[in-house]
Image (tube, rainbow, N blue to C red):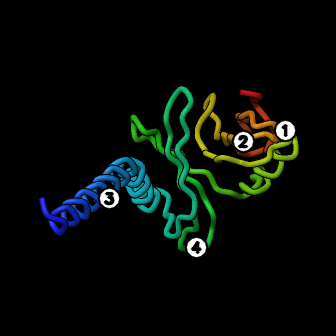
Amino acid sequence: MNKSTKILLTISLIALAIVSALTYLNLSTAPNSSAKSQANEIAKEKAGIVQPDYFGNYTRKKQYYAVGGLTKGEKYRYIVIDAKSGKTDIFNKNNAPVRQTIIDGVAQRYGAKKILHINLGIYKKKPTWEVTFQKKNGKIGYNLVDFKTGKSIQIINNI
């Protein structure tokens, strides 16, 4: 094999590796992207959310997708969608603490260094935030927080 053939073969192998890696990344994120776009469509159709700015994937005993955003009337609301049955529940933000308040409360109560995610779902037939956080010691914690009151329902700490 001459030198130009080796260079061409090397470039081809590198290009193939890059294309393979990009394809893998695209396929691995496709299910979440699909769930998000479907949830946004349901949110628009059933809850009138025209400017979604929140998407959550809550998994406890059941899996729920949640979308939050503004309606045409500039009201903020959430829709929670049961991933299996498609049943929906709609919650207006009125009288409920905002997401950032929930995040700040969990961080303060449990000494969280970093909030990993906050997802809205249904726990014991009530809307509930699931907040996952990392503590300063590197351990992980989960806190279930009541959507309406902001009070802690359940804590799993130091995992």
- Picture quadrant of residue 5: bottom left
Front: mark 4 or 1: 1
Q: Residues within 10 Å of mark 3 (few under 14, many from 20)?
A: few
Q: Amino acid at mark 2?
A: Phe
In the depicted structure, whether residue 24 falls above or below residue 59: below
Q: Residues within 10 Å of mark 2 (few under 14, many from 20)?
A: many
Sequence order check: which comes first, mark 4 or mark 2? 4
Sequence order check: which comes first, mark 3 or mark 2? 3
Where in the figure is residue 107, as x and y percent of width and height? Answer: 82, 46
Where disc 3 sits, the SS reads helix
In the depicted structure, whether residue 105 falls above or below residue 94: above
Q: CA distance from mark 1 to mark 2?
A: 9 Å
Q: Which residue is mark 3?
A: 18
Q: CA distance from mark 4 to mark 2?
A: 34 Å
Measuring 64% from the left and 47% from the top, which residue is drawn there? 117
Please identify the quadrant where the N terminus is shown: bottom left
Q: Residue furthest front?
A: 2
Give yes or no for contact between labels 4 and 1 (Cβ–Cβ under 8 Å).
no
Where disc 1 sits, the SS reads helix
